[in-house]
Image: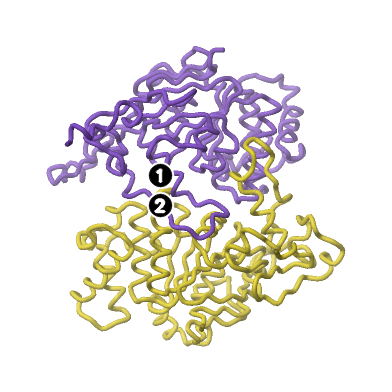
Chain colours: A purple, B yellow
Amino acid sequence: MSPLLTVDRVSKRFPLKATLIDKLTAGLGNRRAGGTVHAVTDVTFEVARGEVLGMVGESGCGKSTLGRIVSGIYAPTEGTVRLDGEPVARGRDDHVDKLTTRVQMIHQDPFASLNPRMKVGETISEGPRIHRLVPASDVRARTRALLEQVGLEGAYADRFPHQFSGGQRQRIAIARALAMQPDLLVLDEAVASLDVSIQAQVLNLFLDLRRDLGLTALFISHDLSVVRHVCDRVAIMYLGRIVELSPAEQLYAAPKHPYTQALFASVPTLGTGRRAFRPIEGEIPSPIDPPPGCAFHPRCPFAGPRCRAEVPRLTASGPGRTVACHLNDGGVGLKEAA
Amino acid sequence: MNAALDVQGLTTRFDTRAGTVTAVNDVSFSVEPGRIMGLVGESGSGKSVTGFSILGLIEEPGRITDGRVLVEGTDLRAMPPGQLRSMRGRKVSMVFQDPMMTLNPVLRIGDQMSMAVRVHERMNKRQALARSRDALAKVGIPSPEERLSAYPHQLSGGMRQRVAIAIALLHRPAVIIADEPTTALDVSIQGQILAEVRRLADETRTAIVWVTHDLAVVSSLADDICVMYAGRIVERGTAEDVIARPRHPYTRGLLDSVPGQHAPGTHLPQIPGSTPQLSRLPSGCPFRNRCPRATEVCTTEPPVARFGGHTALCHHPLEAA
């Protein structure tokens, strides 16, 4: 079966506008002036219909930018994003309204993503009304049905966002996305701002909806346990690139990329008791001036000369698994060093 | 052993339009030198207000109405304001979620640190800078000498938080209150800071109160845990006991709802309903209408407990192992 979403060699770069101060200090080694943020670099993956793909990484790794490219909010600098073979966004300013309604996004902060002056019923029905997805006479009934589908009362349609808690608002945001009958949902840290007990409720709702509606989703999160719970496959991103892509079960059983391994080792988990952390050394490099070769090499315990010179390609490593590491592709070149 | 921090019956109220609410309700706990106490709760549980109340940092419309806060045996609440100010930063210090609450953006790190040193101790600038440099080295900041002349914006979020912790450590305080200090940081950076904090507690014998919503963090960092719900401590015990054998139904529910310990794709156990508003708490036990073990007595009688060992504030606690 052909995949629903195909992301092919997508890159996104943001030019930094040089301020007056940047221009004046350029001679003093200020690299901001005229610099470029390499937010996403050469990313390729597919999502099958009915699949939930997790996108994991730390801040600045490009996972949110990627989510926005998939949603058609940003046009990629290079590469293509296709839904059922049709491009989501063709050029820089190309708006393909009919297509972009097929991807709906759910954002992290339900306090910022809902218009405080609109009744939630209006918020939910606005999209279908404008795009004429539902006959005008059915809009009200449909809105009530959507609210009930996300575990709220239909009568809440006449209330305003401030009358709801964070968890309830996130349910409303989900109802708004579902109202467009999307083929693909992009959830960007959709449960990150919720308390644990509320997070469990919203994750359960997501699992129910997935079962009932056969949802396809890109699930962006920094939380490894949440991703483990809801995703079929997981992509790990580091500094704009996918470094590992694997079925969730195999990934969590045995992470292969040194960054993934380090990430897993530094996450505190319940029930391990007091223990020695094995944190990753050093910090995430700047995407304005990424290190040459493998972006992880300055922090990697296995790095060799090849890692400093050559960007590793994603290569197969077991069924359905790919890893971008020279260790998996001919070695890090320790011999040349000797 | 004498406690570094002993909080007794601390109560903080806020006057709101909906009436007076009790954000911190008769909270008592103590922390011995070198130990880390995890103060855990969800939003609105009163965990952060407890931290602020310990330092007397409560402003109108809030007020601390009751209780004692003993630091190495001296009651902070009985002190005149001037004396209390001399305790803050010297005997008790605070680390905030956002390090920019601590750092002045227009001063070099070395200048603001040495200023903090000289507020409490007579020494010249050079000595103060040396002390600052040592403090930066102690929290694992590479090339601390150079960092002294950096401005906060030149440091990453993780480095800024280390600087904030270094400032809290300048006077070798008996107690540090840390309010969600790693919540805004990435996991790899959080791991580094948790490792440093554990090492610092062991080495400097500072007692640390680590305020957080993250059960996984406290389970791997803290020695003891207090769980807060609706302004009260509802369970207290060693980290191992509370995480492995919770006695309060709320703690049990909270722990069960953490993903990662259940088969992927299955329903997570969830606590029904949401945290009640402090102005509209139910009668009796504030958790009763979300509680699977609640009975008649829970609606009429607020639970009372004599805390000692592993205790839950509950009419029907789960069996201790």
Q: Nearer the viewer, residue A311 or A79?
A: A311
Residue plotted at (64% across, 53% down): B255
- Which chain does tag 2 point to? A
Q: Residues within 10 Å of mark 1 (few under 14, many from 20)?
A: some
- Work out whether residue A136 or residue A236 is closer to the camera in this orientation and state it: A236
Q: Return the mark for residue B270.
A: none
Q: Residues within 10 Å of mark 2 (few under 14, many from 20)?
A: some
In terms of sequence position, does the residue under pointer 1 or pointer 2 come before the other?
A: 1
Q: Which mark is residue A262?
A: 1
Residue placed farthest to the right in the image? B296
**Image quadrant for the C terminus of chain B?**
bottom right
Can residue A160 be spotted in the picture? no
Q: Is residue B2 left or right of residue A10?
A: right
Percent coordinates x, y for residue B230 in the rendering: 67, 64
Mark 2, secondary structure of its residue: loop
- Callouts 1 and 2 in the same chain: yes
The quadrant in which residue A297 appears is: top left
**What kind of residue is marked 2?**
Arg
Q: In the displayed image of the protein, which residue is found farthest to the left? A: A27
Label 1 element class: helix
Place of residue B282 in the rendered image (x, y in percent of width and height, measured from the top left): 77, 63
- Against A159, residue B94 (above or below) is below
Q: Which residue is mark 2?
A: A278
Residue at point 40% right, 52% down?
Answer: A278
In the rendered view, would you say A63 is above or below B141? Answer: above
Residue B65 is situated, as x and y percent measured from the top left of the image, at 61, 79
Specify whether B301 is left or right of A8: right
Disc 1 residue type (three-letter)? Ala
The image quarter containing residue A126 is top right
